[in-house]
Amino acid sequence: MTIYIDPPTWPGHGRLWSHLVSDVSFEELHVFAASIGCPQRAFERDHYDVPSHRYEDAVRAGAVELGSKELVRRLSGAGLRRPKHRRA
C-alpha cells in the first residue's frame, strides 16, 4: 500500500492544495483519505484535493511526498489516471 502526496502548490479558493493519490487502487485511496478526515467531496476523478493545512496530517499518516510530475507518472503507470477531457 502506497499513497502519495505532492506539495501544496496548487492555488484555488484562496488557499494552496496538494493531490493525494494511490498507485494501487481507488479503494485504497478512499480508505486512506477517510482515515485522515478527507471528505468524499474532495475526490476528483483520480485524486483527493488536500488543503495545505492538512498536508502534514497526510504525511504523518504515511503518505509519501513526491513532486507533482512524479506523482502523475506513478498514477499513470498504475493505470489509474483519469485526466480531464480537453475541449477542442
Image (cartoon, rainbow, N blue to C red):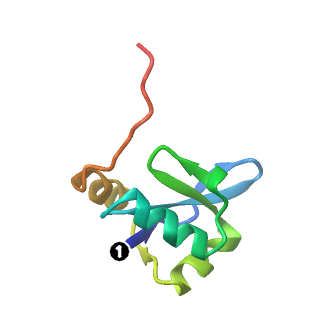
Residue 40 percent across, percent down from the top left:
63, 55
Residue at 55% across, 68% down: 33
- Looking at the rendered structure, the kind of residue marked 1 is Thr
Q: Measured from the top left, where is residue 2 in percent x and y?
A: 35, 74
Q: Residue at x 77, y 51 (%)?
A: 14
Q: Secondary structure at mark 1?
A: loop
Q: Is residue 83 left or right of residue 34?
A: left
Identify the image quadrant of residue 87. top left
Q: Residue at x 32, y 50 (%)?
A: 80
Question: For the residue carrying disc 1, how many other residues have a C-alpha within 10 Å: few (<14), some (14-19), or many (20+)?
Answer: some
Q: Is residue 14 left or right of residue 58?
A: right
Q: Give the quadrant of the C terminus.
A: top left
Q: Quadrant of the N terminus?
A: bottom left
Q: Which residue is situated farthest in the top direction here?
A: 88
Residue to which mark 1 is pinned: 2
Which residue sits at x=59%, y=69%?
34
Query: Percent position (x, y) of residue 5?
Result: 47, 68
Front-most of residues 27 and 86: 27
Residue 85 percent location from the top left of the image: 42, 26
* Residue at the limit of the structure toward the bottom, as seen here: 60
Which residue extends farthest right? 14
How many numbered circles are shown? 1
